[in-house]
Image (spheres, helix red, strand yellow):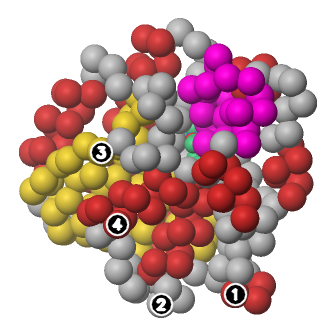
Amino acid sequence: MLRVQAGPWPAGEYPLSSAWLRSKDVSGLRPERLGVDGGGHSVSDGSAKKDTPLKTYRDHYFLKAKQEHYPARSVYKLQELDRRFRIFAKGMRVLDLGAAPGSWSLYAAGQVGPQGFVLGADLVAAETAFPAQVLFVREDVYAPSPEFAALLRDRGPFQVVLSDMAPATIGHRATDQARSAALCREAFELARRCLKQGGSFVYKVFMGPEVKTLSDDLRRCFAAVKSHKPAGSRPESMETFYVARGFKASFP
Ligand SMILES: C[S@@+](CC[C@H](N)C(=O)[O-])C[C@H]1O[C@@H](n2cnc3c(N)ncnc32)[C@H](O)[C@@H]1O
């Protein structure tokens, strides 16, 4: 584990990380030329390669997120999923994989309240100031550290596992889809190990040939698995979201 970052969070609002937003001011560069994770953070989800940078980065949800002090527009996708599927309740423990820059963790923290707990993990750091019930750690899900394994054991089981993870897209559709599916598999394995019985697993995947096998495998472990593409997800984006509810196995 590289770094741990937790609350507190000042005066009842989610402070916007201006440094993070500045870092996304692409000034004429397309997302894939930003280098690290053009397919990663939601403002640069790699789906708008034909758009001008202005349209890509200043759309309705981007501006709304800015006004409401969320570091990424992806928050509205989770909000819509939550309104539709009622994912969260006060006091829940949530594992958020691919949590940077932090919008989903902030939203989940608001839903579970101060009695709840959100463990956010991502390859990259989040500059967002989180409330006290959020613990953010830098982790690669493909190489979890012993400290992360201990956190999962000590702070779990979780009622909800979220995965908004996305690979660094290279623009080769089949490769991007395969990498996205591999991240979902990894998230599924983690969910199987640390979800509470009856819990939910919410994940994002780039639609491709492996998606059906993945959802079929999930159906063996969950009472219901449904897909949904929220309004906040651009129509041209190949991402869609799955919500699996009613985890069948008990926590070991
Ligand atoms: C779309 S962003 C997540 C946005 C986040 N849900 C939010 O609302 O702020 C996708 C994230 O997946 C992360 N990611 C990709 N591969 C990962 C891995 N192997 N382990 C952990 N995180 C990963 C990326 O670093 C990126 O921050």
Q: Which residue is mark 1?
A: 12
The residue sitting at 27% across, 63% down in the picture is 85
Q: Which residue is mark 3?
A: 228
Kind of residue at badge 3: His
CB atoms of marks 4 and 3 within 8 Å? no
Per the rendered image, the range of residues in magenta is 38-58
Q: CA distance from mark 3 to mark 1?
A: 31 Å
Ligand 1, by image quadrant, is top right
- Percent across and percent down for residue 61 are 61, 51
Q: Viewer-proximal residue, 212 or 54? A: 54
CB atoms of marks 1 and 4 within 8 Å? no
Q: CA distance from mark 1 to mark 4?
A: 22 Å
CB atoms of marks 2 and 3 within 8 Å? no
Q: Which residue is mark 4?
A: 83
Residue 252 has which mark?
A: none
Q: Main secondary structure of the magenta part?
A: loop
